[in-house]
Image: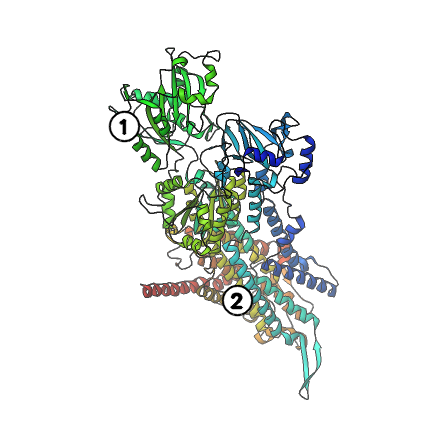
Amino acid sequence: MEEIVETPFKAWSWSVEQCLKEYKVKLDKGLSTYEAEKRRETFGWNELQKEQGKPLWKLVLEQFDDMLVKILLVAAFISFVLAYLQGNDAHESGFESYVEPFVIILILVLNAIVGVWQEGNAEKALEALKDMQCDSTKVLRDGYLVPDLPARELVPGDIVELRVGDKVPADMRVAVLKTSTLRVEQSSLTGEAMPVLKSTNCIFMDDCELQAKENMVFAGTTVVNGSCICIVVSIGMSTEIGNIQTQIHEASLEESETPLKKKLDEFGNRLTTAIGIVCLVVWVINYKYFLSWEIVNGRPTNFQFSFDKCTYYFKIAIALAVAAIPEGLPAVITTCLALGTRKMAQKNAIVRKLPSVETLGCTTVICSDKTGTLTTNQMAVTEFFTLGGKTTAARIFQVEGTTYDPKDGGIVDWNCYNMDANLQAVAEICAVCNDAGIFCDGRLFRVTGLPTEAALKVLVTCCEWWTKRSKRVATLEFDRIRKSMSVIARKSNGGNRLLVKGAVESLLERSSYVQLADGSIFPIDEQCRELLLTRLLDMSSRGLRCLGLAYKDDLGEFSDYYTENHPAHKKLLDPSSYSSIETGLIFVGAVGIRDPPREEVHQAIEDCRGAGINVMVITGDNKSTAEAICKEIRLFSENEDLEGKSFTGKEFMTLSSAQQIDILSRPGGKVFSRAEPRHKQDIVRMLKDMGEIVAMTGDGVNDAPALKLADIGIAMGIAGTEVAKEAADMVLADDNFSTIVSAVSEGRSIYNNMKSFIRYMISSNVGEVISIFLTAAIGIPECMIPVQLLWVNLVTDGPPATALGFNPSDVDIMQKPPRKSSDPLITSWIFFRYMVIGSYVGIATVGVFIVWYTRASFLGINLVNDGHTLVELSQLRNWGECSTWSNFTATPFTVGGGSRTISFSNPCDYFSVGKVKAMTLSLSVLVAIEMFNSLNALSEDNSLVRMPPWRNPWLLVAMSVSFGLHCLILYVPVLANVFGVVPLSLSEWLLVILVSAPVILIDEVLKFVGRRKLFRTKVKRS
C-alpha cells in the first residue's frame, strides 16, 4: 500500500472526497487496526511532548552564574585556605578561624536553594496545556464504532464522531454534519467572543487565518451545538495547540532579564572591577611589610620575603572584598519584592514571579487582549427595539448590565408593570425559543449552550414563568440558509404558536405583518421595512450582534401538533421544509447583543494615558467589533479616523519592517484584530526590540506564548485558562483591567523604595571599603575582621534596608511618565554624595580605633579607665616592628566593667589580641553610623524636617532591632568570642554616638546643595 504524506496538507481548501482519498479511508469503514498501527509508527502518539526539564545539578550551577556570587565564592575559598594555613602554623584548629568562609558558603547555599525552588515552579504552562486534551473519543475502526478509544491513539485519517459537549481530540476536517448546525467554542484558542458555526464547504484560500477555517475543528476546543463526523488531519505537536506549546517553549527561551536585574548586573560588573583594583592597590602598598631588599651597586639584592605577612595583607585585601560586596542586598531585594506581592495581593493582583513587581513600575506599553480582558466575555443585551403606536415609529430600549447575573442591571427607565403586547412577545420568544441555561458556581454566573441565547435569558428574568405558560413541543434547528431557529410552543389555551429568532434581514423577508405596542397587527409596508432596516444598520454599526424576533399563530397543519405521532411530524424531520413553515411571520422587534466592556476600563485607560503608558488592543475578534469596543472604552474618540491605528494581524504583518516600527512608535492607542498567536508574539517582540517594557494581558490559550514573551504577562484569574495563568507573571484575581493600573502604581512605588535601600546599602559598603583602605594605607592593625563585616552587611544593615521598602509613595506617582530602562540607578551626584558619606564612615571607624590606642580622652570622655596602655601614632603605624622595640610593655586591661581581663604573654600581642576593645569601638561606630544613615535614605532630596522619621515607623522599629542584634553579639559571651568583640561601657557608648551622629548633618548639607542644584536646573529650562 502506498505511504501517505507525513507533511500536513491544507485540508480546509480540499473537498471531503479529496481528503478521504488522500488518507485512503472510507467514511463508513474508518481505518483498519493494522493501518492505524502503521501510521502511528510514522506520526507517533496524539499527545503533546513533555519538554525535558533542566537537571538539578544544572539548576544549582545556574544560581552561581552571577558576578557578585562569584566574587563571594572566591573570597570564601581564599578565606578557607588562609584559615587552614593559620591553623597549621599555630598547631590548632579553632572554629573561629573558619566562621568567615562558612558564613559566606551558607549565604550562597541558601541563595541557591531559593533560586532552584523558584526555577522549579516556573515552567507549568506546558503541563496545563496537556489538561486541555481530551481523554477518549468515538472512532470508527474496522467498520465498527469504538465508543471510548483513548485520544492519544488517534492517527491522521481516523474517522471521529463528535457530539454536544465533546472536547475535540485533534485538528480535524468536518466531513458530515449530523445535525443542521454545528457550533464550536474556540475563544480560548482564537479569541473570538462567539461560538463559531462550522460547515463542510471548502475554503478556497491557501493562506487562511485560523478564524476563517470554518470547516476545521481544533484540538482543545468544545462542541456546544450539534454533532458531526470528522477526519483527523493533525495530531500531537502538529495541531494548533501543539504549535502554541512550541511557541510557549520558544518564548521562554527568549525571556529577558528585568530592568532591575540588568541594573544590578551592571553594578556587579563595575563593582568587580573596582574591587579588583582596590584589593590589588591595598596589597601592593603594603609590600614593604612582607618584601624587602638591599641596593648594592645600584642593583637590588638580598631579597627577604615573609609569607606570614604576605598572607596577612592578602587577607586584608579579602576583607576589603567582603566589605565591598553588599551580601545582604539580594535578601533585602527579595524581602521588599515579597512585601510588594502581599500589597498587590490585597489589591487582587497575584504576582507569581517576584521580579515582576519591579518590572511593572517601568511598563511603557500594555498590550491587552479584548475578549475577557477589556470585555466581560459574557454576552449581554444592551439595546432592543419594537414598534410603538404606529408602523412608522420605533421604540428603543436601553439595557444595563454586563454579566450573566440576572440581577445585574436592567432596562433603563422602565418598570415591569408596563408590559405591553410587544414586550410580552419579546419576553416569550427570548425565554422559550432558547436552549441555554444559566447557573452560579459560587462566585461567577456561567452558561450552558450558546452565549447569545444566555444573554436573551438574562434579559427575561422570569423565564420559568414563560416556559410553564408556553410548553415547547418541537424545535426547528438553525441552519445557514434561512439563518433562523424556531420552536412550536403549546399555549395555555391549547393552541400552538411558532416562536422565531434569527438574522433580522432574513426574518423581515419572511414576515408579512408587524405587531404594534397595543397588540394590533398591521401588514408590513415598504416604509415600515425601511424604518426597521435603518434601526438594524444603526445597531450593527456599533458592533452589536442583532437578532430579529417574530411569531406566527396560524400554523395550519401544525396548529394541533403535540407529539411525534402527529401526521405532520415527517415535515419536521426534513430541514428543507423549515423555510416554508417560517413564512407569513409577525415581526415583533430586534435585540442588540454584544460582549460588553468592563465598567472600570474607561477610567483605567485614562489613568494609563496620564501615566504615559500606551495601550494597544490585540484580539482575535473581527475588526468592526474591536474598533467599536475601543471607541466605547475611549481608547479612540467617537469620530476618530482609525487609518494607521487599526489593522488586522494579516494586514500589519504584510507591511515592511520600517512601516511596522513607525506605526508602533506613534503615540496613542492601536488595535490589531483577527490576530493569531504568532501575530501577538511578533508585535510584542518588535516592541521589546524598540526598547519598550511590555506588559501583555490575556486569558486564552492563544495568549499564552505572548504572555510568556512579554516583560510581564498578566492573566485573568476567573475567566482565564490554566494555560494563560501558568504562562503569566501576574494573575488578576478579579479579572479587572483597572487592577493593572493599581499594580503599576505599586510597582513604581516599590522601585523608588528599592532605590532608597540600594543606595543606603551601597553607601554603607563604600564606608567599609574606605575604612579598610585607610587601615592598609596608614599601616595600622585591621580595625575590623571579615566576619564582623559580614555580620554588618547581612544582619545589622538588613532590617533598616527592608524597612525602607515601606516608605510612603509620592502622591503624583501616576502623573509621571515611566522611567526609562536606561536611567542610571546611581547618578554622578548621588555617587559623589555617597563618596563623601563613605569617607566620613571610613574616617570615623578608623579614627575611633586610633583614638583608643593614642588618646587618654576624647570629646571629654575618659578612655583609659580600663587601664590599657597608650602608644604613639608612629608606633601604631609600625606595629609590625614591635619585636625590635626596646623596653616596650603593654599592661593588661579590663573589659565588661571589670568582669574580664585581657592579658598577653608577648607585649606585641597588644596589637592583635589586645585590639579587641578598639575593634569593638570601630564596629559599633560603623553600626551606629549606618543606622543614622538609614534616616538619610528616607528621601533622596527632602530634608528630615520635611520627611521626619515617624513617616515610616517601620524604620524606627528596624533601627531598634539592628541595635538590639549588635548588643546581642557584644553582651552574649559565646557570640562575642565568635565575632571577636567585647562589651562596652556607658561612656564608650557615648563616644560611639558622638562620633556617629554627624553623618546626618553632613547629608543634610549635601541634600540642600542638591535641592539648590535641581532648582537652578529647572529655572534654566523654564
Q: Quadrant of residue 233?
A: top right
- Return the mark for residue 842: 2
Left or right position of 677 against 533:
right
The part of the image, by quadrant, that contains residue 219 is top right
Q: Amino acid at mark 2?
A: Gly
Element under label 2?
A: helix
**In the shown orientation, is residue 970 left or right of residue 543?**
right
Within 10 Å of disc 2 (Cα), the crowding (few <14, some 14-19, many 20+) is many
Q: Position of residue 633 (x, y in %)?
A: 36, 41
Residue 735 lies, in percent from the top left, at 45, 38
Circle 1 — which element? helix
Residue drawn at (41%, 14%) of the image: 558
Q: Earlier in the sequence, mark 2 or mark 1?
A: 1
Q: Is residue 62 positioned above or below 878 on the image?
A: above
The N terminus lies in quadrant: top right
Where does the C terminus fall, quadrant-wise? bottom left
Using the image, tell me which numbered label, if any, was put on residue 526: 1
